[in-house]
Every structure is written in C-alpha cells, then in structure tokens.
Image (cartoon, helix red, strand yellow):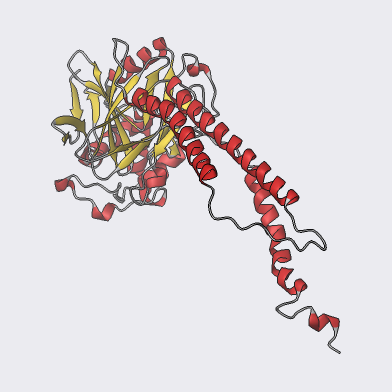
C-alpha cells in the first residue's frame, strides 16, 4: 500500500493541486492590504480644486454609480441562479435545451444601448465645455512651451514699461477664481500638460498649438495642500525621454492682490552685483550660463538688458519666445528647480552645479544648440569657488 505522504504529492491529488495556492495566499493578502492603504496622493483627479475639474469628477461619479448598479444587478442574478438552479443530491434532471430567445436578446441589447445613450449626453456636453475658449476681460493668457525636461511660461499680457513680457519656468502662478487660458506647444517632442486637480491632460505637440483652461476655486489660495497654501502639483503625462518623471510643475494660486504683487515683482530686473562672491558669480554666469539661460538684469549704470541667448519657436504661424534653458531672473524666489523636482536650497543647487546628471537623468552629450536640440545641462567642470559664486548670485536674485 502507498503511504499517505506519498499519495498526497501525486499530481492529481487535491493537496498537491492546492499546495502552490496555499504558499502564495499570504502574498496575495499582503498585496491587497497594501493596496488598500494607498492614499489618493497629491495629484488626484478625484479631489477637484476648481469648477472644471469638479465637472469632470461629477461625470466620473455618474458613470461609476451606473457601473456599480449594473454590477449589483448582475451579481444578484448570478447568485440567485447559482442557488435556485444548482445541482441537488439524487437529482438527475438536465437543463432544458433551447436555441436562442429573441425577446431576451432584444432586451439585453436595448438596455446597454440606452445606458450608453444616457451617458453620452453629459459626456459630450462636458467635452464641449472643457474645450471652449473662455471669454471676458478677466481671462489670463499664458503661453506654455514644453522642453526636455522643463516647462516655460510666458504671460503675453503682463508687460513692463519697456515692453518686456513676464517669463518664468516650472512654477505657474495664477489668480484664484479666474479662468487661465493656456496656449501650448513643444520645443522638441510630444509632452502632455497635466494638473489633475484643475483639469484633464492635454498633449503639447511640436509645430502645433493646443489649448487648455485652468480655473481654481475662489478660496483655493488659502487651502494648504501639504506643499503650502494654494500650491497644486502637476507634471508631464506623456513619456518624453530619460527625465520624463522629473518634468514636473507647481501651480501657485493667489488671491487677486497677491497675484498682481507677484507679477509686478517678476517684471523688476535682477540687480547685477558689483563686489564680493556674487560679483564673481555673475562673471561665471556671463561666461558659462548664458549659453543656454537668460536673465533680465539691471546694470550698475541703471541700464536694463536681457542677457543670454533667445530663440523663437514657431507653431502654426505663432511665435513663442523661448530660451534653451529656463529663464533665471528671480531664480532665488522660486521654491524648486530642475523641472520642479528639487527644493531650491543651497545644498541641492551646489550638487546640481557640480554635476546636474547626478541629480536628474539627462543626455547632455547629445545637445545641439545649432538645431535647438537640448537634452539637459552638461557638467561644465566648475570649481568650488565658481559654484559658490553662482549659488550666492542665483539665490540672491529673489
């Protein structure tokens, strides 16, 4: 006779069949437990912070509610069928064989069609509302250019007395309760602009122009999202190369007076230092950084000029003013840098200037300025003194 222990390990035996399942069951339970502990995160579409995103969330809730209703009805019918028509002991009945049921087939074809038709009305209406261009004197226009791997923002209607437009990078400042109309293109590859709490995503395509409207709630400027009052996180949602995950942005929502004060301050040029470590840093900035970056500065004699290379990106006949790297005017007043991936503190900036690719995956060896192809900031081999000068200069440009 075969011992019980040997019989249990035969392929057809029940204990053998379920042995693997018993081994992985704890892992499955742990996975489900950890998944249930995940929060919504700082970039959640399901936590709307503006009227447009709230409309999207309302549509999602409608679709989800109908889906739950259909699921419950199907599961109830399924359980009733299992109980009522289950095989019983000593029951030799066989199900009645039928070929089709025209009435039933018509019913289960019509019901889904009606559900889809009902959902189509608010879905199409939402799409038209989201894509509509806002009108009125309170609409803020912003031009957005996607780069590998950072965002450039230009406010064409906010200008200085000498005609300069406001340009910044990675941190978009907007007033609460007002529509902000984004006109977007790309300098290189396809990106996707996405700030989940304010609207859905929209592709940013080289040579083309796309639009997106953002609008934050009137009280959003005072809401602390965990990153500061009125700060909303966003990022590129289209894979665009090595540092795609580090192509982020921050949206700062201000009350009207606060936004105006920020805009006025951004139009004031940064001051050129004349002595000390900062002056040495400015010399290095002119020799090295202006190859890709720009800055609007006031010289000691009071002259205001924008230093650094500038080029224009054409998309569908429109000109987007741009530089190869982020505009560094008022760099010290920003909370982040490097595609909004790193806190703007001295230690991070020093490490970045020493070797940027150590902090962010980039491919600067393939940079081609002649064809406006930039794939990251290279390591310029700066000395400690040069780095100290640049840190003092840039952090002083508030």
Say if 57 sits above or below 373 in the image: above
Residue at image coords 20%, 12%: 161
> What residue is rendered at 21% in x and 36% in y?
208
* Side of 384 relative to 25 (left or right): left
Residue depicted at x 22% and y 15%? 160
Q: Position of residue 41 (x, y in %)?
A: 55, 36
Q: Is residue 268 above or below residue 81?
A: above
Give the quadrant of residue 297: top left
Image quadrant holding the N terminus, namely: bottom right
Task: Say whether residue 322 is visible.
Answer: yes
Q: Quadrant of the C terminus?
A: top left
Q: Can you give x and y, in whole percent of width and height, for residue 115 in the image?
A: 49, 33
Task: Determine whether 349 is above or below 10 in the image.
Answer: above
Front residue (pair 269, 136): 136
- Is residue 384 among what the camera can see? no
Q: Position of residue 23 (x, y in %)?
A: 72, 65
Q: Nearer the viewer, residue 66 or 353?
A: 66
> With 49 as the anchor, is 382 left or right in this view?
left
Residue 10, image x, y percentages: 74, 81
Residue 246 appears in which quarter of the rendering?
Answer: top left
Q: How many marks?
A: 0
Q: Residue 226 vs residue 354: left or right?
A: right
Q: As drawn, which residue projects farthest toward the bottom?
A: 1
């Amino acid at each position: 006779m075969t011992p019980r222990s040997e019989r249990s390990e035969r392929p057809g035996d029940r204990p053998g069949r379920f042995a693997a399942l018993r081994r992985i069951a704890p892992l499955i339970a742990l996975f489900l437990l950890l998944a249930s502990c995940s929060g919504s995160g700082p970039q959640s579409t399901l936590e709307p912070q503006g009227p447009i995103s709230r409309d999207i969330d309302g549509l999602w809730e409608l679709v989800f509610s109908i889906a739950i209703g259909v699921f419950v009805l199907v599961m109830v019918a399924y359980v009733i069928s299992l109980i009522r028509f289950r095989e019983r002991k000593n029951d030799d009945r066989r199900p009645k064989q039928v070929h089709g049921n025209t009435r039933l087939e018509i019913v289960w074809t019509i019901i889904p069609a009606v559900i889809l038709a009902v959902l189509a009305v608010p879905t199409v209406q939402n799409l038209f509302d989201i894509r509509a261009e806002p009108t009125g004197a309170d609409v803020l226009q912003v031009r957005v250019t996607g780069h590998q791997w950072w965002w450039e923002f230009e406010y064409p209607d906010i200008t200085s007395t000498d005609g300069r437009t406001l340009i910044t990078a990675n941190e978009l400042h907007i007033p609460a309760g007002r529509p902000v109309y984004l006109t977007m293109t790309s300098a290189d590859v396809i990106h996707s602009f996405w700030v989940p709490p304010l609207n859905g995503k929209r592709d940013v395509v080289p040579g083309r122009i796309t639009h997106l409207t953002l609008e934050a709630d009137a009280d959003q400027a005072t809401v602390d999202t965990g990153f500061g009052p009125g700060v909303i996180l966003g990022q590129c949602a289209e894979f665009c190369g090595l540092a795609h995950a580090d192509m982020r942005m921050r949206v700062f929502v201000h009350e009207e007076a606060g936004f105006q004060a920020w805009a006025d301050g951004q139009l004031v040029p940064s001051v050129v230092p004349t002595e000390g470590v900062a002056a040495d840093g400015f010399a290095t900035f002119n020799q090295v950084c202006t190859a890709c970056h720009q800055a609007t500065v006031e010289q000691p004699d009071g002259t205001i000029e924008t230093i650094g290379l500038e080029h224009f990106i054409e998309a569908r006949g429109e000109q987007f003013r741009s530089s190869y790297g982020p505009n560094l005017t008022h760099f010290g007043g920003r909370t982040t840098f490097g595609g909004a991936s790193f806190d703007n503190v001295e230690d991070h900036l020093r490490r970045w200037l020493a070797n940027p690719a150590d902090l962010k995956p980039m491919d600067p060896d393939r940079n081609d300025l002649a064809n406006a192809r930039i794939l990251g900031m290279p390591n310029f081999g700066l000395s400690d003194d040069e780095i100290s000068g640049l840190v003092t200069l840039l952090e002083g440009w508030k």
